[in-house]
Each structure stands twice: as C-alpha cells, then as structure tokens.
Amino acid sequence: MNQTDHNVSPVSEPKKRSLVGMAAAILSVLGMVFFCLYLGLFAYSFQSGPRPIGATDTLLTVSNIVFGIAIVVGLIGGAAGLFSLFQKNNKKTFGVIGIVLAALILCGSCGIYAWAFLTPK
C-alpha cells in the first residue's frame, strides 16, 4: 500500500432534491392559490349592489368549498414537507418551503375564523 492511500477520504455523493419535498412545495403553493381565490370570492360576496336572489348564498357556498380545499391541500403539503425533512441524503429546501406556506395558510385560516367569531353580528 502506498502512503497516500491512508489519507484519502471517501467521496460523498452530492445531495439530490427530494421528490417528496418538491411535492410538498407544489401542494402548498396550490393551497395558497386556493386560499387567495377564497379571499377574493369572500370579498366579492360582500360587495354592495343588486344581485339575484340566492346568488350570494351560492357564492358563499362555493367560497367555503374553496376554503376547505385550501386547508386540506395545505395540510397535506405541510405534512409532506415535514416528512421530507427527515429524509437523509436529500436537500431540505423544498420541504421547508412547503412547511412555511402551509403554516401561512393555517395562520390565515385561524385569523379568518377568529375574525368571523369575534365580530359582532
């Protein structure tokens, strides 16, 4: 054996991007899109002006369905991001993005619920 063989360190493979982390980021961005769509529909439903009877109820129903979709997709994205953080030999960037966006969706949802319950009727 040569003397240089003892000083050679093993070459580690470069870290790859996590597919679960990418899925988490994509799902969280999709959840954020649904959340922003909900905010737009919710604001539009309270505009003043004449509307046909039942149009506001339908609009509120659709906005609540979009709100539910945003929360579910955000939670799935956050869970996938959390899962991707525990994978070894993968980059964690997309997982962190997924968790942060999911947290924003959940904080916004809690803020809307608090506003809805605390405002006088």
Image (spheres, grey):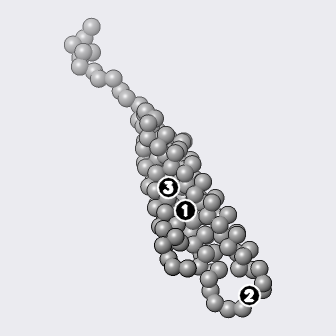
- Could you say which is closer to the camera, residue 104 or residue 14? 104
- Residue at the location (23% across, 19% down)? 7
The residue pinned by badge 3 equals: 102
Residue 51 has which mark?
A: 2
Position of 62 with respect to 90 (left or right) is right
Whichever of labels 3 and 1 marks the residue nearer the N terminus, that label is: 1
**Residue 31, position as x, y percentages in the image:** 57, 59
Pair 2/1: label in front: 2
Cα–Cα span, label 3 and label 2: 35 Å
Whichever of labels 2 and 1 marks the residue nearer the N terminus, that label is: 1
Q: Quadrant of the C terminus?
A: bottom right
**Residue 54, position as x, y percentages in the image:** 77, 80
Q: What type is the residue that disc 2 sits on?
A: Arg
Determine crowd level at label 3: few under 14, some 14-19, many 20+ residues with C-alpha closer than 10 A. many
Position of 39 with respect to 84 (left or right) is right
- Could you say which is closer to the camera, residue 96 or residue 118? 118
Q: What type is the residue that disc 1 sits on?
A: Met
Cα–Cα span, label 3 and label 1: 8 Å
The residue pinned by badge 1 equals: 32
- Residue at the location (53% across, 72% down)? 116
Q: Quadrant of the N terminus?
A: top left
Residue 49 has which mark?
A: none
Residue farthest to the front? 121
- Residue at the location (43% across, 33% down)? 88
Pair 3/2: label in front: 2
Position of 5 with respect to 41 (left or right) is left
**Element marked by disc 3:** helix
